[in-house]
Image (spheres, rainbow, N blue to C red):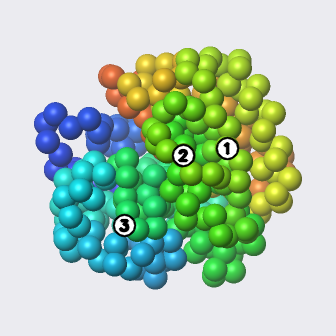
């Protein structure tokens, strides 16, 4: 399994910023320390090509972001202060998603220790998301003939409104989002399959709901799954509003990954959201996804 990373520099964020930017480095260190990933499996994420970014995003938006000329309202909606490091990091996240998708087609499974930027729309960013990595990856693989039908399984606790908006006119991509009904974004965009969840849902009800709706994804007949395995459904998460345990999240991952493996469908993983306080609880949950993957795919 190839695992792509892009945590070699730190975004310049204010001291009181809510986004836990250290989690990417902490996750890579945790995976290595626990023997879940070897150094030889780690690959630094390539920067996405402009032509691939433009498959999902408006050229004027891309130019304004990369030159630092987005207006203040647009920057506030994204939630990060603009910097050259942010531009590089954003390209690396998109490039890592494309690379992981291609690697999954070769090896059956791959991942990147970032990604899941599903709130990014064609011409604006939102909710810490600037370029939509899974939309870019899906459209790149389809338009270059590497895949015919792709499914996005989005289990981040926040609805993937950007996925839904960008991919709505692409019938070769199926978007499944299972998310908190009352959580961000407060104005949802219709996906191919949306499953809203009540606040404080616990392990058993969550996983029963997933098992009920997951067959619709495979009925679509994907030859690649992009899995947004966000861990913000964890009870300790500051932004999640659900009440899953680490064990419940591992059961969730096992349900998705075992279903893909049983059908011979390659899967590329992006880590999605995780905002626990302390952040180590999110890092543990992210690492557990790789623990499950190793158990199912043989390390």
74 sits to left or right of 266 = left
Callout 2 touching callout 1 (CB < 8 Å): yes
Which residue was labeled with disc 3? Answer: 91
Which disc number belongs to residue 188? 2
Q: Quadrant of the C terminus?
A: top right
Residue at x-position 40% and y-position 43% = 28
Crowdedness near tag 3: few (<14), some (14–19) or many (≥20) residues, C-alpha within 10 Å: many
Tell me which numbered mark, 2 or 1, is placed earlier along the sequence.
2
Q: Answer yes or no: is residue 287 visible.
A: no
SS assignment at label 1: strand
Measuring from the top left, give residue 261's x and y in whole percent: 78, 48
Measuring from the top left, give residue 78's x and y in whole percent: 31, 53
Crowdedness near tag 2: few (<14), some (14–19) or many (≥20) residues, C-alpha within 10 Å: some
Crowdedness near tag 1: few (<14), some (14–19) or many (≥20) residues, C-alpha within 10 Å: many
SS assignment at label 3: helix
Tell me which numbered mark, 3 or 1, is placed earlier along the sequence.
3
Callout 2 touching callout 3 (CB < 8 Å): no
Q: Nearer the viewer, residue 210 or 112?
A: 210
Residue at x-position 79% and y-position 33% = 211
Which residue was labeled with disc 1? Answer: 194
């Amino acid at each position: 399994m190839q695992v792509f990373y892009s945590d070699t520099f730190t975004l310049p964020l204010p001291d009181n910023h809510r986004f836990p930017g250290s989690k990417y480095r902490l996750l890579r260190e945790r995976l290595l320390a626990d023997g879940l990933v070897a150094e030889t499996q780690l690959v630094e994420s390539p920067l996405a090509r402009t032509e691939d970014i433009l498959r999902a995003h408006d050229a004027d938006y891309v130019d304004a972001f990369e030159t630092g000329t987005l207006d203040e309202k647009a920057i506030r909606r994204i939630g990060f202060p603009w910097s050259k490091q942010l531009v590089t990091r954003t390209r690396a996240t998109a490039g890592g998603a494309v690379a992981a998708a291609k690697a999954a087609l070769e090896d059956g499974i791959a991942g990147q220790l970032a990604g899941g930027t599903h709130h990014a729309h064609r011409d604006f960013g939102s909710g810490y998301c600037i370029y939509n990595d899974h939309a870019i990856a899906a459209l790149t693989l389809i338009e270059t003939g590497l895949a015919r039908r792709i499914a996005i399984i989005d289990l981040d606790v926040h609805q993937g409104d950007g996925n839904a908006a960008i991919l709505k006119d692409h019938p070769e991509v199926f978007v499944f989002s299972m998310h908190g009904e009352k959580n961000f974004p407060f104005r949802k965009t219709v996906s191919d399959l949306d499953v809203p969840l009540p606040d404080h849902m616990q392990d058993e009800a969550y996983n029963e709901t997933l098992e009920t709706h997951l067959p619709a994804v495979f009925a679509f007949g994907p030859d690649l799954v992009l899995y947004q395995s966000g861990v913000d459904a964890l009870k300790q998460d500051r932004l999640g509003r659900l009440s899953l345990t680490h064990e419940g999240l591992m059961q969730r991952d096992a349900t998705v990954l075992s279903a893909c493996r049983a059908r011979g469908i390659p899967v590329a993983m992006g880590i999605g959201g995780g905002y626990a306080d302390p952040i180590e609880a999110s890092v543990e949950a992210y690492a557990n996804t790789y623990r499950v993957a190793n158990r199912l795919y043989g390390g």
